[in-house]
Amino acid sequence: KAGVTQTPRYLIKTRGQQVTLSCSPISGHRSVSWYQQTPGQGLQFLFEYFSETQRNKGNFPGRFSGRQFSNSRSEMNVSTLELGDSALYLCASSLSAGATDTQYFGPGTRLTVL
Amino acid sequence: GQQLNQSPQSMFIQEGEDVSMNCTSSSIFNTWLWYKQEPGEGPVLLIALYKAGELTSNGRLTAQFGITRKDSFLNISASIPSDVGIYFCAGQPPPGGGADGLTFGKGTHLIIQP
């Protein structure tokens, strides 16, 4: 079974631009969560989607948004990019939402904001 | 929000030695997970723990879910060069626990000297 895939793997943008990242979950998984990883803050939860609905949201500004499609694929968008948005963005999928299902991570998208 | 204290921050050990790392929390978790991350990749799940007191092994890895539900440890026996990487603990709070998504520790960077 294929794992979680994320595209693109690397991205360079400039301040003020916006960016869209894509995540395809493991086949059969319906929940997708997004995380931001930086050297200073570590791994931080962004949001979780299940059945095309956002279930949970972390403590990030409204510039960070996401959506999930009927095939469970998910996208996250960051508008008006700031230098501090440079990070590895990780997507994780699980069978369903909630505390009991284990999340499996993709390789991430490395975003650099210049 | 919830905080996970993971220690040690880094370990320099000789090949063949045993390794021990742990995570503690100020509040309880329903699930404890241990991940390993290598450069340029997303975290890979090593062990998942779902019940207080549970002790689970995966090859040379052993992890335990603390009785108080506020801590967990990971042991690696007879370390080998491919064990190098960053190990993260992660906890999933109970429903309504006030935190969203997985909460991650800052990681333990394992370096093995031949």
Image (tube, grey):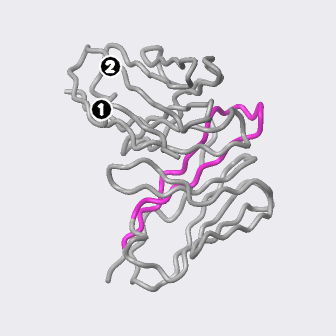
Q: Residue at x 48, y 56 (%)?
A: B107
Residue A49 is marked as: none
Q: Which residue is mark 2?
A: A19
Q: Is residue B113 above or below residue A46?
A: below
Q: Quadrant of the N terminus of chain B?
A: top right
Mark 2 touches mark 1? (CB < 8 Å):
yes
Magenta region: which residues?
B85-111
Q: Residue at x 61, y 35 (%)?
A: A29
As drawn, is B51 to the left or to the right of A95? right
* Chain for disc number 1: A
Q: Which amino acid, mark 1?
A: Leu
* Chain for disc number 2: A
Which of the marked residues, 2 or 1, is nearer the chain's N terminus?
2
Q: Quadrant of the C terminus of chain B?
A: bottom left
Q: Residue at x 47, y 14 (%)?
A: A62
Crowd around label 1: few <14 · some 14–19 · many ≥20 (10 Å): some
Q: Is residue A100 above or below residue A76?
A: below
- Judge by depth and name the residue closer to the eye, B24 or A36: A36
Instruction: Examine the image and state in which quarter residue A103 appears.
Output: top right
Q: Residue at x 38, y 41 (%)?
A: A38
Check residue B104 for magenta coloring. yes
Residue A111 is marked as: 1
- Judge by depth and name the residue closer to the eye, B68 or A72: A72
Q: Which amino acid, mark 2?
A: Val
